[in-house]
Image (cartoon, helix red, strand yellow):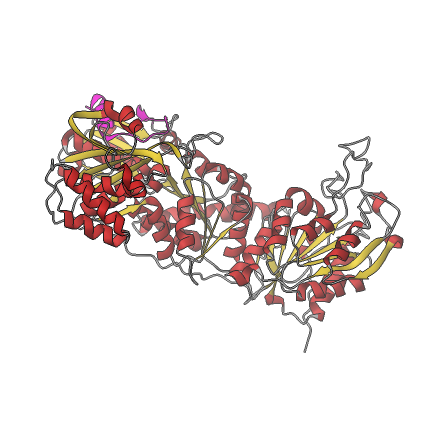
Amino acid sequence: MVKANFNTKEEITWCPGCSNFMILEAVKRALASLGLKKEEVVMTTGIGCHGKIFDYIDIGGVYGLHGRPIPVAIGIKLGNPKLKVLTFAGDGDTYNEGISHFIHACRYNSDITLIVHDNRAFSLTTGQATATSQEGYKTKVEPKGEFLKPLNPISLALSSGASFVARVNAKNIEHTSKVLEEAIRHKGFSYVEVLQDCLIFNLEINNLDKLMYKVENRDNKERARKLAEEWNYDSKTGKIPIGIFYQEKRKTLEEEF
Amino acid sequence: MRLNVLIGGKAGQGINKISEIVANVLTSLGYFTFNYRDYGSLIRGGHNFNVLSVSNKRVGSIESKLDGIVALDDLTIEKHKIELKKGGFVISYKGFENFERNLNVALSGALIKVLGIDKDLLLKELRKELNVPNAIEAAEKGYESEEKKFNFGKLKNKIKIMSGTEGVVQGFINSKADWYFAYPMTPATGVLHELGLRQNGKHKVFQAENEISVVNMALGCSFSGKRVMVGTSGGGFDLMSESLSFQGMSEIPLVVYLASRPGPGTGVPTYSTQSDLNVALRAGHGEFPRIVIAPGDPIECVEKVNEAFYLSERFKCLAIILSDKHLAESEFSSDRKPNKVLDVKIERDLPGQKIVRASSYEHDERRHTTEKPEVVKRMQEKRLEKYEKIKNFLQRNKVEMIKIYGNKNAKNLVIGWGSTKTVILDALDAIDKSIETRKGKWKFLQVLYLKPLSDEIKEEIEKVQEKKGRVIVVENNATGQLGRLIREKTGLKVEKRILKYDSRPFRSDELAEELRGMGK
């Protein structure tokens, strides 16, 4: 079987060296490895640096509004359950502007895959703090530093009922693509939080790789919660688990209809 | 012959059931009925009432003076006796307290007797509706308690009762629509409930977490190749605005049902207004084409929802059906059948078969993001060209963008849109039978398409102005939004306007009085 080539000829406008290139590579590898045809995979994207990926993968989809790629994806899946639907979103998209959609998507268990490019800043609008920015992050809005504590999206997803929860490191392309494969294969709402560096704005969160270690947990929700709480998105020390935190079998939204 | 009967009580006492039973019996005899529902934003208690207007001729409004009152509590009599005509009847709950939940059925029986209708017709109707033995007993006791005052014999008309909500639902089903997405909001909720109850493998309903999700799910679902509608009222529509603009850029077909209630803000949630025309015409940033249609009765709801689906799919554009609480929730009656159904075909490339892309970013023909000025200009023009194409299509295919009633050569022209249609018709017939005979001093121009606007509107106004006649716009809002739209599009100023913005609909006798004073 000839595996589909997911490259496009569009000029890539991410900053040189941006970890979005690595996420793009991991996604293409996962799609190729799953042997999916281009026509059967559809993506939705939000608005932000991540969203540019819309032009860089040779599949169809909807380049939506900031904060709204999740409901668009659910609508596509309800309309045609045979499609594989991937949602690319940023941390600003998912945890700020569109957080209600994120929480409800976890509840609905629509069979889509959410990939959050979390560089912990609004980078395409020049670096303001998002809900996952660390306390003290200095921006033009908050020259004295962010005064709010960050949200822990992994804990939020678990308590909201997500049936597949994972976190990966963008720089580890091999691991990311393997987790993505599993997420796409999962029947139900799969959520993959991708920690990525931003070379221009929130520099403090870069190079946390040395704190990361791989975990794999499936149906033990208690353990999943504990793993999620190991790192609170604020500390620069301690350990950051990456890998699959939780997976359960549950009726999907589409199966209800 | 026309009667107006008010039926009042506390929320939860079942006054709607009385209107329903009596109206069903009357229409089976060939009478036209119109039922207005007046209720506050509460679930139990308070004071709710319906006014049921009955006539041997077409009726689509209520009058301010009552021929009778059916009271399920004392407050109803206290509040409304001032509206009762001299010699008008009152049917009281007193003596029927024992029937508890069947009080409404007993009073239906009493009202049927007063109207001089055979008891068998009542029992036949009740057996169709409720199979509770106590209900029949209550109805019989109610029937026996009153004396005949009128004589409603059999007429030849074949009449069907329908609310605007039911019309919208029928239009949705006729269009073979697949999905309805909504978040509950009065007065659009009726469609959500009705379609929810009628879900099957073909028509499906999903109540999403908010209106922003609703409209984005709808766009996704439509993109996947389905016929999709969303429904809401003003506040929810405001939340959808950004995504309407997204529709404009992505050109994914979308039908929106907007049922208005008075704003701004939470406003008067269970009452009616026509104050959302401006927002329907303009919501969403940027410049992009759209269609705005305002049906004026339930049969037109059936037809226009179908047209909205057809046009939205054909031109890949936004189509808004503009209704309001008065049209959505009043029960109209009609002897007219809807026009032939348009077949809504999906003939675009679909995901699953091809690589299909849609974008909220400016894009080139392949749907790849662009910021090049020449492409931006070209794509903007391509989208806006649709406006002319839509208008040409409507005119070429003789789609009813306006309707004219009454005497074509009349000196007095009334212009209106949406739910004021039927009360204007009733008022003009009350003045001089202009509509019925087409020989009076009046004609009525009903605007159905607010966008695009028909060129005939300008011609009609100029015709009347040349004769030194009178042009009057009638609207249920405070600023005369249709009048302003006409001025914007035609350059003509309509001098006279009758505006009502107390959240209640026009009464036909009061409107007739006002019009009479302005006419030539």
At x 45%, y 44%, the residue is B290
**Residue B66 to residue B329: above or below:** above
Q: Give the x, y percent position of residue A135.
A: 81, 38
Asked whether the viewer can see residue A195, the reply is no
**Nearer the observer, B16 or A84:** B16
Q: Give the x, y percent position of residue B434.
A: 16, 34
* Magenta segment: B493-520
Q: Give the x, y percent position of residue A171.
A: 82, 57
Q: Give the x, y percent position of residue B98.
A: 28, 39
At x 70%, y 69%, the residue is A32
**Nearer the observer, B225 or A77:** A77
**Residue A79 on the magenta segment:** no
The quadrant the N terminus of chain B occupies is top left
The image quarter containing residue B355 is bottom right
At x 21%, y 21%, the residue is B517
The image quarter containing residue A148 is top right
**Nearer the observer, B280 or B398:** B280
**Number of numbered discs visible in the structure rendering:** 0
Asked whether the viewer can see residue B300, the reply is yes
At x 44%, y 38%, the residue is B281
**Residue B502 on the magenta segment:** yes
The quadrant the C terminus of chain B occupies is top left
The image quarter containing residue B37 is top left
**Nearer the observer, B107 or B509:** B107
**Residue B175 to residue B438: above or below:** below
**Residue furthest to the bottom:** A1
